[in-house]
Image (cartoon, rainbow, N blue to C red):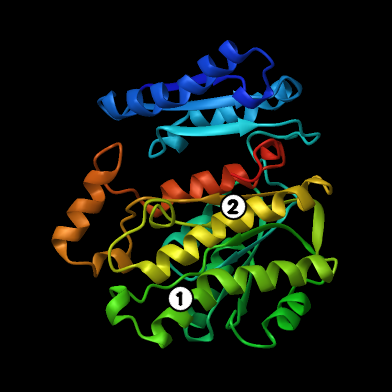
Amino acid sequence: SAHIVILGRAPESLDDPLASVAQRALEGFSRSLAKELRNGATLQLLYVDPAAQDQLEGALRFFLSPKSAFISGQVLRLTACATQVQDWSRPLAGRKALVTGAARGIGAAIAETLARDGAEVVLLDVPQAKADLDALAARLGGRSVALDICASDASAHLLEALPEGIDIVVHNAGITRDKTLANMTPEYWDAVLAVNLKAPQVLTQALLDGGALHDNARIVLLASISGIAGNRGQANYAASKAGLIGLAQAWAPLLAKRGASINAVAPGFIETRMTAAIPFALRETGRRMSSLGQGGLPQDVAEAVAWLGQPGSGAVNAQ
């Protein structure tokens, strides 16, 4: 399948109003054209800062490869960044990665992909998933941490589990408790916000305060298209995922001073055990809402996360 990348300049960076308008028009053009492509073809728009041209290689390697097969119609900004990848065959070699919600589904796929790319993985999930977690960690040559991320002592236990610090943090753990707002119970609301939004904030702050987050670190938050477009019966879930996008934007300037970055990945419909429990009609609707007209696989999400975890992806921040 064809992979198309359009290169532009950030409209706000241009002094010429007409040039700025032309660059802004590229966004609508590229998003529309992405919906018109056929046979699995994809299209992305990259706004490249003049000082970030040496950061293009990593983005082009990803978006022009089969690894980005489920991504289309995206608009990203690349800004100046000092880090580079030393070995494109194992871009994460020598880096330590933490993945929450790693026992199965998307989290397990992310852990496997990070390990494939050379990272030493630390896998975290609830104590009830310890058997699956331990088995996956053993297979990947990593370590497992059975921990309730909402527990009052979760931060302390996490810091104990990471004595050498961490380079990549993937906040994947999440739950759904779907009800229309009129029927939403306080327990459903609080549970989703606690796991999906509060825990990533608290744990990341603990890593920062405890000195465990290395310079040039990469943080990836698993948001959702629901956090962008909303979804009936998911007011709590959509709020939590929109909050994660806000978290990336709020923390990005602070992390950039350390050469670190934070981004949110917002998947559409992904075929997992959790989505398999959704009524058939809703599953089909979710699949058809994708620009490619089908559901994605956990591996599709994992490839995007692994790319954002690379040293050479520091040019992408707050997105």
Disc 2 secondary structure class: helix
Q: Which mark is residue 59?
A: none
Q: Quadrant of residue 203?
A: bottom right
Outermost residue to the left: 281
Residue 198, placed above or below residue 153:
above
Residue 59, placed above or below residue 251:
above
Q: Mark 1 is on which residue type? A: Val
Q: Mark 2 is on which residue type? A: Leu
Q: Which residue lies at the image location 37% right of the left edge and 68% below the top edge?
A: 235
Residue matched to label 2: 114
Visible residue check, residue 157:
yes
List x then y, in percent, for residue 231: 31, 59
Q: Which residue lies at the image location 83% right of the left edge and 49% below the top edge?
A: 258
Residue matched to label 1: 192
List x then y, in percent, for residue 113: 53, 51
Considering depth in this image, is 272 or 49 the residue closer to the camera?
49
Left or right of residue 56, residue 205 in this image: right
Disc 1 secondary structure class: helix
**Which comes sooner in the sequence, label 1 or label 2?**
2
Considering depth in this image, is 254 or 307 the residue closer to the camera?
254
Q: Quadrant of residue 51?
A: top right
List x then y, in percent, for residue 261: 71, 47
Considering depth in this image, is 210 or 136 the residue closer to the camera?
210
Q: Which residue lies at the image location 41% right of the left edge and 26% below the top edge?
A: 28
Residue 193, placed above or below residue 220:
below
Visible residue check, residue 108:
no
